[in-house]
């Protein structure tokens, strides 16, 4: 069982100068509501997401010389033969894959993201400690960032669950830092990230006057082995009313 | 702790602007929720926290072209409408477009509109306008390399009437949703959603969400256009704080770029553009996909693509490097 010991989130719950009580579960204190079904809307990087681009076609990725060399060795048939067809579906790549997400609470301190593309599961741990062998999805440490900063207005409580625009107006965002990933691909054509990669993500949510709601995900990849500097991408998902269209598909290399 | 003399408390409140802000411009006050219980410093701290709204976007922000670099830096290619929910009218008009229209005097110094400029190859400077008495932020200003100053009013003023003039920046008002700044823009002049002729009408409105995560700025733009879009068109773009950046001046001057008869506007009649297939051929994509439309931006379109591409989504031929200028 993961614990919240040492989590900066605890400070938020206690407030400035308040009594140190038992930590509230992450679910009960959520700054925004991310649960539900979401679909990626591919209005950006279409040629690098909807199809599998040709080897060496990666003009947007700030690869260093080593990264370029690794990308040039990409062989999707070899990946498939080796049972490595999910290399583009690791945590640093899977959120760019076209598909739906299902986000739900796995338990009171673990947010779970299931992806339609590649049928992957990401577990975002509020508290707990890093352990185990590297996996495609690695270990994700999550914390709420309430509006107004820690100790600010957002610390007064979680988002309104009374309906209306409450989930967005609650304020802040979710910050997730993922490490211990198996080496994978940032792009399906073999653009590499290494086992040393640190993936930092921020989840925001909007609610529009026309009823649409968007999940806006900012991701920052740091991988000194393959990248020059930080690699920024932001990806957007539209809220769906339900999971009626959910259609999981296995990892694919063609 | 003893009670604070009312005069001192009042001075503290004046210092933080709580009492001086005009009611219409004042953010939701929370001070009445708090019971002063400490020193003047504590009270002031409480008041500052109570009046602070949102986050500070002030600074020089450098664009990061880690998405859509080919479109944003060298520029989009003719016939690339992938993933954009364009209407048939937009598609028809775009196919009549010729790049050399940019050489016309009237177009040479034309700035990108508020909805497109986030995707342009420009750094941006964001500053805030502060009321000298209340010290509340009354407006944000954004200034890119190829733009004039754009204002986002935060003082609650209404948008002007429908008959008010339209501008490249439009008329923008902002509100806080937690730490996310949400901006509604109306009164935009006609512009484009991609600088290869895909039009955006002057009936369009724009919603933006500005989000700051440390030294990273993410901006979501959502364009609603009843003429040229069939669904809202969203893009999200990232900038990085750059302490060494200064947006330089951009004294654009009109010159004679092409010797052509007066009054000629480069364009093609519908159905006569022979180059529209070049993009699809050059990148090994089905022409049907490159025509865009709302269906092409959803994951389910992959099934259509797979059929159009003979069962595999792999692009086998790398694009000709000469396609990238």
Image (tube, rainbow, N blue to C red):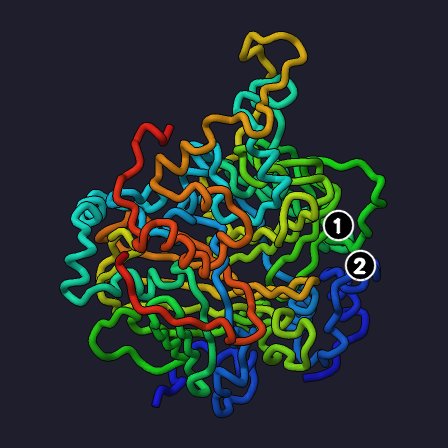
**Do marks 2 and 1 both belong to one polypeptide chain?**
yes
Q: Residues within 10 Å of mark 1 (few under 14, many from 20)?
A: some
Query: How would you rate the neighbour count of disc 2 (Cα within 10 Å): few for under 14, some for 14-19, many for 20 or more?
Result: some
| Mark-to-mark CA distance, 2 and 1 | 9 Å
Q: Residue at x 53, y 57 (%)?
A: B212
Q: Say above or below: B152 vs B38.
A: above
Q: Which residue is mark 1?
A: B131
- Residue behind mark 2: B21
Secondary structure, mark 1, is loop
Give left or right: position of B137 versus A104: right
Using the image as rendered, state which of residue B132 and residue A143 is in the foreground: A143
Rendering quarter of residue B146: top right
Point out residue B156 in the picture as x, y percentages from the top left corner.
Answer: 79, 55
* Viewer-closest of A165 and B12: A165
Which is more N-terminal, label 1 or label 2?
2
Inspect this view and state whether residue A153 appears: no
Residue located at (43% from left, 41% from top): B287
Residue B190 located left or right of residue A188: right
Q: Residue B112 at x, y = what percent?
A: 60, 34
Report if the CB atoms under discs 2 and 1 are less than 8 Å apart: yes
**Residue A136, picture quadrant:** bottom left
| Element under disc 2 | loop
Q: Residue at x 17, y 67 (%)?
A: A83
B146 shown above or below B227? above
Q: Nearer the viewer, residue B138 or B77?
A: B77
- Label 2 lies in what chain? B
Q: Relative to residue B80, is residue A38 depicted above or below?
A: below
Residue at x-position 19% and y-position 45%: A72
Quadrant in the rendering for residue A221: bottom left
In the rendered image, which quarter contains the N terminus of chain B?
A: bottom right
């Amino acid at each position: 069982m993961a614990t919240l010991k040492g989590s900066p989130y605890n400070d938020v719950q206690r407030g400035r100068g308040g009594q140190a009580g038992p930590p509230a579960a992450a679910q009960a204190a959520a700054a925004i509501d991310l649960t539900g079904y979401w679909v990626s809307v591919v209005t950006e990087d279409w040629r690098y997401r909807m199809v599998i681009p040709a080897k060496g076609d990666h003009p947007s990725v700030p690869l260093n010389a080593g990264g370029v060399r690794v990308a040039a060795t990409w062989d999707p048939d070899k990946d498939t033969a080796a049972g490595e067809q999910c290399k583009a579906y690791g945590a640093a790549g899977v959120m760019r894959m076209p598909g739906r997400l299902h986000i739900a609470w796995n338990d009171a301190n673990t947010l779970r993201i299931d992806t339609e593309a590649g049928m992957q599961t990401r577990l975002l741990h509020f508290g707990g400690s890093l352990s185990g062998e590297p996996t495609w999805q690695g270990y994700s440490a999550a914390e709420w960032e309430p509006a107004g900063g820690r100790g600010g207005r957002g610390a007064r409580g979680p988002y309104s669950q009374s309906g209306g625009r409450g989930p967005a107006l609650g304020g802040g965002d979710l910050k997730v830092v993922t490490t211990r990933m198996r080496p994978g691909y940032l792009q399906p054509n073999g653009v590499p990230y290494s086992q040393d990669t640190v993936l930092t993500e921020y989840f925001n949510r909007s609610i529009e006057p026309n009823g649409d709601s968007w999940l806006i995900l900012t991701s920052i990849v740091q991988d000194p082995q393959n990248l020059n500097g930080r690699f920024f991408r932001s990806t957007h998902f539209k809220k769906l009313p339900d999971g009626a269209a959910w259609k999981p598909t296995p990892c694919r290399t063609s | 702790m003893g009670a604070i003399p009312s005069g001192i408390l009042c001075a503290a409140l004046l210092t933080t602007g709580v009492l001086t802000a005009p009611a219409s411009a004042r953010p939701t006050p929370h001070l009445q929720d708090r019971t002063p219980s400490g020193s003047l410093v504590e009270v002031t701290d409480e008041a500052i926290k109570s009046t602070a709204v949102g986050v500070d976007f002030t600074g020089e922000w450098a664009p990061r072209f880690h998405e859509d670099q080919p479109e944003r830096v060298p520029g989009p290619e003719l016939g690339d409408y992938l993933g954009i929910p364009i209407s048939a009218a937009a598609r028809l008009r775009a196919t009549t477009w010729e790049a050399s229209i940019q050489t016309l005097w009237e177009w040479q110094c034309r700035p990108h509109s508020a909805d497109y400029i986030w995707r342009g190859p420009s750094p941006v400077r964001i500053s805030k306008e502060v009321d000298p008495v209340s010290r509340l932020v009354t407006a944000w200003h954004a200034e890119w390399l190829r733009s004039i100053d754009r204002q986002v009013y935060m003082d609650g003023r209404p948008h002007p009437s429908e008959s008010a003039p339209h501008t490249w920046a439009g008329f923008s008002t902002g509100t806080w949703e937690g730490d996310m700044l949400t901006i509604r823009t109306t009164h935009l002049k006609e512009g484009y959603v991609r600088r290869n002729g895909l039009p955006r009408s002057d009936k369009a409105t724009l919603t933006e969400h500005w989000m700051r995560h440390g030294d990273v700025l993410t901006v979501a733009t959502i364009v609603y256009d009843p003429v040229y879009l069939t669904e809202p068109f969203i893009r999200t773009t990232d900038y990085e704080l750059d302490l060494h950046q200064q947006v330089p001046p951009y004294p654009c001057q009109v010159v004679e770029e092409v010797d052509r008869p007066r009054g000629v506007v480069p364009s093609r009649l519908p159905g006569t553009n022979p180059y529209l297939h070049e993009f699809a051929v050059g990148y090994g994509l089905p022409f049907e996909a490159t025509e865009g439309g709302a269906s092409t931006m959803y994951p389910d379109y992959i099934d259509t693509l797979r059929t159009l591409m003979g069962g595999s989504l792999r692009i086998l031929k790398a694009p000709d490097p000469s396609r990238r200028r």
